[in-house]
Each structure stands twice: as structure tokens, then as C-alpha cells.
Amino acid sequence: MHLNNFVLQNNIETPAYIYDLPNLREILIKAKSAADRYGYHIHYAIKANNNNRILDTVQSFGFGADCVSGREIELAISSGFSNDEIFFAGVGKTDEEIVLALNSHILAFNVESVHELQVIGEWAKILNKNARIALRINPDVDAQTHHYITTGLQENKFGIFSHEISTALEIIRTNEHLKFVGLHFHVGSQITDLTVFKNLCLKVNEWNRWFSERGFIPEILNLGGGLGVDYNQPDSVPGKNFEEFFGIFHRFLEPLSNQKIHFELGRSLVAQCGSLLSRVLYIKNGLSKNFAILDAGMTELIRPALYQASHTIQNLNNSSGETHKYDIVGPICESSDCFGKDIFLQKLSRGNIIAVRTAGAYGEVMSSQYNLRKPLSIYFIE
Ligand code: LLP
């Protein structure tokens, strides 16, 4: 059922997130078939959206999981993801989380520093477990995206820097509980210039050879996530860019024989299926601007305030006739609480339902209770 029909036929409580599950399934089918073509494995980056129904749906397609906390590992396992399909990433894994991951026999720790590697090694020894290690290499590739979501440059905190790699290998050599299984890379998020991934491949090829020549043969190459979505085209054909994305890796990556290629995709899988729904509370006509004040704000979707992200905004009650210019703002006491400036929409009236589209990734999960906001309502188009 189309978003408009669903919203207009149901008594929606706002603010709310609504997830279009047929759209999600369509995207998952496209992603899976594009990856399967080259024998690639997709892990879903749970941080993008950990809603139960989303997890159940993604899991039913046989994807693995990419987790960044102990609680995400527990949630992945209870949602049916296989333990041996779980990556555990993050620069700040706590002792408790390391122990949980060791006891859960996950596919690999994506290790981000020499110090972390030592601590994982100590715990593996104490618990007499094998810790499967994928070293996260900081490849110094510019993701050409917002600087807050760029991760693969030397100035970023992520990954092991090249000058520390020999030390990391020495630690692995001298601790029999540390099993080197592969390499991990992730250069950033919302990447729309696909040559970034070509550049990544070239760096990965160098590192792949470098490790192999030293007797550390990576059985796993994990290329991370980062594939961007088009926030201006919320109704574009779902999942149309996966062929091109995986095609680039197929063209430029030079894997050794028997190497398994993994990806950690978040946004590109779940962004399109979600929308934030909100009601217009007030129209305020200023001298130079008209403001539409909504009952949702940065507490429900922080991306515009935090990354100057622009999401398509629609009035679901009125989509014909003359348009007017509005600043679409939320109720929070912060000037950055604004979903869009100078947005042209058909005349807005109190009570109109506004959809902020392509909000399925990093939307609900990044919502907060700042201003003691009431919990969000959640709806599904089945
Ligand atoms: N792997 C690693 C190691 C990551 O750090 C991330 C995302 C992913 C995979 C998934 O990336 P994706 O396919 O979703 O781009 N809150 C920001 C995005 C933060 C991304 C953090 N890392 C936003 O709303 O744009």
C-alpha cells in the first residue's frame, strides 16, 4: 500500500516512524542477488536501524550482522543471525563486550588498535578461547562525504595506522589465542561518488599482497559499507545501485584464491523504507519567511541538524495546487532544529501530516528524549 493511502486511512499518532516492509524486501532481494552474483557476503550494519521487524526481515534473507556493541551482538543473536556471521567493530570495545563476543564465537573482531588487540589477546588467554581477528586498516582514502561520516583518513580515529601494523602482527605471532583471519576496511558513509570504492579496492589490493607476503593470508576481506542513497528521490526504483556497487569491486578487487569477500551495509538497505511522520502544529508568518512548526524535530530525526542532511519533505494531505515557501522546523529549543529551509510545498494547514522521507537509516535509532519528548509511535506497511 502506498504511504499516502496508509497514512490517510489510518489514525496515525505523531511523531512516528513508518516502515514500508515490501519496499525493504525489494531492496534486500536486489542487494542479495547483486552480491550473490560474485559470491559476496552481506552483513547488515545493525546500527542503522535495530527495529525488531527490520531485523527479522533482513535476517530472513540470510545476511550476517555487523555489530558495534555487546547489546547489538545479543540482539543479533536473539533475532536469529548466526553467531559465526557476526562481525564486532568499534574503537572502544569494553572488557565485558570482548568477553561476550569471545563466548559467542563470532566470525571476527574488527580490531581498531594495537592496544585493543593486546586486551582481546589477554581475555582470550584467560578464557582459553580463540579470538578471530580482522585488522581494520585505515587506508587513507577520502570518502568525499560529510566530514562527520568520513572514517578512512589518517586524521580519523578509526583503524590501525600503517606504522602500527608490524607491532600488531608481532602480538598475533606471540599469542596462540589470537587467530588472524582477515582485513577490514570502511572509509565512510553516504558515499555517492563510486570512484571512492575503486580507490578503496586499489588500496585493499596493496594491503592484501603485503599481508600475504608476510605469511598472514587473509581468508576474509571485509570492505565495510558506505554506499549512499539519493535523498532527493524517495520514490526511485528500490535498490537500483547495488549492481553498480558490487560491479566495481568485482572489476577492481584482486582477491587471492578462496578469499571470502564481505560487506557491512546499513543505510543502502534500510534508508528508503522509512519515513518520519509528523503533524503541522502551527504556521507562523514572519516578515521574510513562513515557518511551519511540526510536532517532530531533531529529537526524532537528528540528521539535518547534525550533518546538514536534506531529506525530501512532503505534505501528505495536500499535493496539488500552488506552492508556498516554508522553513520546516521542529518544536525543540535549538536553532538547528530545522528539517529544511525555503522548501516549496502546497499550502500547509494545522493538522496536515508531513512525511520526511528516506529516514529508515540513522533515524529512529538516533532519536533522543531531549526535552523529555514522548516516545515515537511505529507503524508498518505490510
Ligand atoms: N561498517 C562500519 C565500520 C561503520 O562504521 C558503518 C557506519 C557501517 C559499516 C555502515 O555504513 P553504511 O552502509 O550505513 O554507510 N549517522 C550517520 C552515519 C554514521 C555511519 C557510521 N558507520 C548518518 O546519519 O549519516
Image (cartoon, helix red, strand yellow):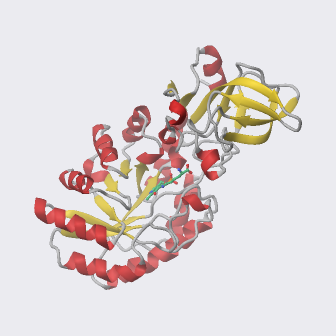
| Residue 116 in the image: above or below residue 279 | below
For residue 202, side relative to residue 72 (left or right): right
| Residue 83 in the image: above or below residue 382 | below
For residue 247, side relative to residue 261 (left or right): right
For residue 15, side relative to residue 219 (left or right): right
Q: Residue at x 20, y 69 (%)?
A: 178
Q: Quadrant of the rendered structure where residue 313 is?
A: top right
Q: Is residue 111 visible in the rendered structure shown here? A: yes
Q: Which residue is drawn at 45% across and 67% down?
A: 157
**Residue 36 place in picture, x, y as percent:** 43, 53
| Residue 20 in the image: above or below residue 272 | above
Near-viewer residue (65 or 128): 128
| Residue 32 in the image: above or below residue 273 | below
Near-viewer residue (144 or 157): 157
Q: Residue at x 52, y 59 (%)?
A: 246
**Residue 164 place in picture, x, y as percent:** 36, 80
Q: Quadrant of the rendered structure where residue 350 is?
A: top right
In which quadrant will I find the N terminus?
Answer: top right
Near-viewer residue (255 or 59): 59
**Residue 211 place in picture, x, y as percent:** 34, 80
Q: Is residue 381 visible in the rendered structure shown here? A: no
**Residue 287 place in picture, x, y as percent:** 89, 35
